[in-house]
Amino acid sequence: RFGSFEIFKSADEHTGREGPSVGRDDIRAQMLDYVISSFYPEIQAAHAEDRAQRNAAFFREVTRRTARMVAEWQCVGFCHGVLNTDNMSIVGLTIDYGPFGFLDRYDPNHVCNASDSAGRYAYSKQPEVCRWNLQKLAEALEPELPREQGEAILAEFDAEFRCHYLQKMRRKLGLVRTELPDDGALVARLLETMHLTGADFTNTFYLLSSFPVGPEPLGLPAFLAALTAQCASLEELKLAFRPQMDPR
């Protein structure tokens, strides 16, 4: 878990709280040795003679796996619910998703955790939160991972996320033969339309797979009827877009 390394966290500037093993660089080094040799033996073998390069390669792989993991979440409408550092794995697995959920009506601001009144872990914010958690991990690894090096590696997160996300969304839309520069814009327009019409996330993509093709698609009217049936009613949309009061 990312949070396991925060036992070395120095005093917080706002709360004054610090990790129980702050200053114990010897334990941090031992813990890092164990984690890399146990879960990333290929990295350990490739950089056995260069500790600094080994640690950088480790953090880069954790960053890559985390970016791809959250991209997978976004593509299937998965909402984790409690994305704190202690609920994220250094091997890129989805763990500790107690109040999790999946999108029904597409709403980028959907919050599946009833206790998350501020919407910190909303569906659309998950990539940002995962990146923030990686930043906290990098900070906890200092001085084993110099700050400048950690920041440089972390800067690779966004590109990795976008690439994997778009690749998966292309497959969901059947865009597998040719990749065009405006594919990303196409996905964004589809999601915007789904949001405005209250379309069901999973069923919309399922129905798109049955889109009739050919010079004269005979089943087009039935397809369009089924597709629009996944959209919310006017009354449901009024309720969904009703202004919300700040609970504070």
Image (cartoon, rainbow, N blue to C red):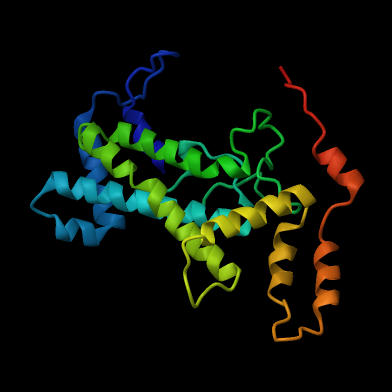
Q: Nearer the viewer, residue 55 or 29?
A: 55
Q: Can residue 141 be seen from the camera position used here? A: yes
Q: Find the residue positioned furthest to the front.
A: 215
Q: Residue at x 50, y 58 (%)?
A: 165
- Is residue 73 found left or right of 5 in the rendered image? right
Residue 195: x and y in percent read 72, 49
Q: Find the residue positioned furthest to the left.
A: 49
191 versus 21 height, above or below: below
- Location of the C terminus by quadrant is top right
223 versus 194 height, above or below: below
Q: Residue at x 71, y 58 (%)?
A: 201
Residue 235: x and y in percent read 91, 44
- Is residue 80 found left or right of 150 in the rendered image? right
**Quadrant hosting residue 124:** top right
- Location of the N terminus by quadrant is top left
6 versus 181 height, above or below: above
Q: Nearer the viewer, residue 41 or 222?
A: 222
Residue 164: x and y in percent read 45, 59
Q: Can residue 103 be seen from the camera position used here? A: no
191 versus 178 height, above or below: above
Residue 48: x and y in percent read 12, 55
- Is residue 46 found left or right of 72 in the rendered image? left
Q: Residue at x 19, y 56 (%)?
A: 44
Q: Nearer the viewer, residue 179 or 35?
A: 179
Number of numbered markers: 0
Q: Nearer the viewer, residue 164 or 102?
A: 164
